Amino acid sequence: MIQKLQHAKNGVDIRTHLGIPNWEKVFTQLASAHPNSRIGVFYCGSPALTKTLKSLCQETSLNSSTRFQFHKENY
């Protein structure tokens, strides 16, 4: 319903993704779309996901020409 209203108002489609993101797929797609680039990843939240995202930044940076820079935010 909200998606239809948004499209009618702005002509823009909104895609809703439910569930937990496949972070490995997200990083791989970003690396493929932005070769030889630097991408900053900023995160504030649970320590478990902090470890996962930091690890993916390091791993994807080693396996591609894209460099991911992880930044943990604390409020």
Image: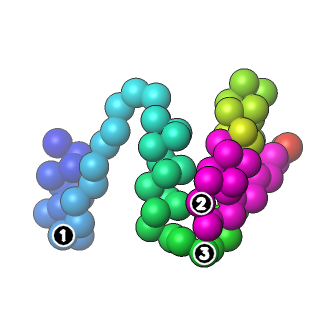
Q: Nearer the viewer, mark 1 or mark 2?
A: 2
Image depth: mark 3 or mark 1 in front:
3
Above or below residue 53? Residue 33 is: below
Q: Secondary structure beneath disc 1?
A: loop
Which residue lies under the disc numbered 3?
Answer: 36
Q: Quadrant of residue 53?
A: top right
How many circles with numbers are drawn on the protein?
3
Give the SS element for disc 3.
loop
Eyeballing the image, is 2 above or below 30? above
Please report the residue visible at 44 percent of the width from the left and 55 percent of the height from the top. 29
Number of other residues with Cα within 10 Å of mark 3, as a class: few under 14, some 14 to 19, many 20 or more = few
Whole-percent x, y for residue 52 in the image: 68, 33
- Magenta-drawn segment: 56-73
Q: Residue 51's image quarter?
A: top right
According to the picture, the residue beneath numbered tag 1 turns out to be 11
Q: Is residue 55 visible?
A: yes
Residue under numbered circle 2:
64
The earlier-in-sequence mark between 1 and 2 is: 1
Q: Position of residue 4 (x, y in %)?
A: 15, 52
Residue occupying the far bottom of the picture: 36
Callouts 3 and 2 close, C-beta under 8 Å: no
Nearest the camera: 58 or 45? 58
Q: Identify residue type, mark 3.
A: Asn
Label 2 sits on a secondary structure element that is: loop
Tell me if I can see residue 9 in this picture: no
Marks 3 and 2 sit apart, C-alpha to C-alpha, by 8 Å
Residues 31 and 2: in front is: 31
Q: Residue at x 22, y 59 (%)?
A: 13
Among numbered discs 3 and 1, the one appearing first in the sequence? 1
Q: Is residue 3 left or right of residue 18?
A: left
Query: The N terminus appears in which quarter of the rendering?
Result: top left
